[in-house]
Image (cartoon, helix red, strand yellow):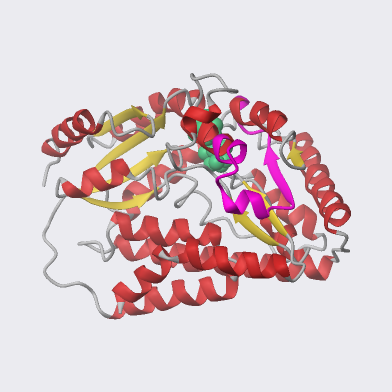
Amino acid sequence: MLDEFMQGFANAREVNLMRIKEAKDQGGKVVGIYCTFCPQELILAAGAIPVGLCGMSETPIAAAEETLPRNLCPLIKSSYGFAATETCPFFFFSDLIVGETTCDGKKKMFELMEDLKPVHVMQLPHLNNSQASLELWVGEVRRLKDRLEEELQVNISDQDIWEAIEVINQEKRAIKAMFDLNRADPPLLSGMEILTAAWSRSFSSDKGEMINNLNGLVEEVAHKPKNGRAKAPRVLLTGCPVGLGTEKVVRLTEELGAYVVAMENCSGYKTLELQTDTEGTDPIVALAEKYLSIPCSCMSPNPARLELLESMIEDFRADAVIDLTWQACHTYNIEAYEVGKLVKSKELPYLHLESDYSNSDLESLKVRIEAMLEMVDM
Ligand code: SF4
Ligand code: SF4
């Protein structure tokens, strides 16, 4: 049964592609998003389908480098390359693209993407604990609502937004419950399994179905714990986003006999404890407050990431931490210093890896991960 659930998640991209095509044929709207800062509740409230477009493949990077500098993070180059080469069907079906001024590379890339599709860029403040930042971000969330209404020719009521907030809150709870299965020792799911399930949600055209599948998986696994899993080092992965296609560090770590028990990155646990408050009167303010508290390295300072990491090290009983930085991602690269200090203060092995989407460094990654695992005190 677990295999059936996992197969369903692994097939989500293809299945949802067909559904999105059908929805488009019937006049439905699709909005492409690149980052976890995008308030996808507004897209749902507009009656449109939000789809994750973050590039996780090396294939279109060469084409992207005809326009973008080579010395740029592979995620940005891959995302732009898919768009420029018209090889991402989800980009093709998107009526509007939503971007944010997160890191410098991404925000400048969105300027170029405007030649390919309508792009709406939200101006994200980088100080997340000030009233001025919150007011600016509330204004930006309202501006996105206005753009969605104009572009998609719909009216979005507060009630529509509250209903969408409830859906996304439920989805977050379901994904968190799946991740939390791995607090058990030995963990109940492999790193590749949680990555597959978590990643597939970004393509889901039916949030209700995705929530049911996640809850079904949790029920299945929680009541039938795997027996006989060997004792092995428990590794926590942090750093830049990873997805299917860029999972080499997760895969290598598990091939070397360790468990990747959780991922702190934004494609993993980073936002899962953030629920939109449903007690207020203005759903836009509620959304703005939640999204502004995401502990991404583009925030400065970003102490909440260290707090989250510290609690995850405890909760997931991590024996070691791997911090993955995609080449030319300055914000995560610089934060690696503080992350390393935190992990070492816990007397745990810490490994900072800098890599790209190619497989050219597989052997050296393997050697370095193996050396770190040997330092784990079992
Ligand atoms: S790491 Fe930060 S900027 Fe990059 S996709 Fe995640 S939340 Fe967005
Ligand atoms: S990985 Fe780093 S450089 Fe790349 S898009 Fe995310 S924050 Fe920007």
- At 29% across and 73% down in the image, what residue appears? 3
Inspect the magenta stretch and tell me whether residue 184 lies in it: no
328 or 124: which is nearer to us?
328
Which portion, as a residue range, is magenta? 81-104
In which quarter of the view is residue 286 placed?
bottom right
Residue 221 x, y percent position in the rendering: 31, 74
**Is 351 positioned to the left or the right of 300 in the image?**
left
Residue 214 x, y percent position in the rendering: 45, 71
Up-down: is 220 above or below 130? Answer: below
- At 73% across and 71% down in the image, what residue appears? 163
Residue 358 x, y percent position in the rendering: 34, 32
Q: Quadrant of the N terminus?
A: bottom left
- At 51% across and 56% down in the image, what residue appears? 272
**Is 191 positioned to the left or the right of 178 in the image?**
left
Q: Is residue 302 visible?
A: no
**Is 205 positioned to the left or the right of 327 in the image?**
right
**Is 64 positioned to the left or the right of 253 in the image?**
right
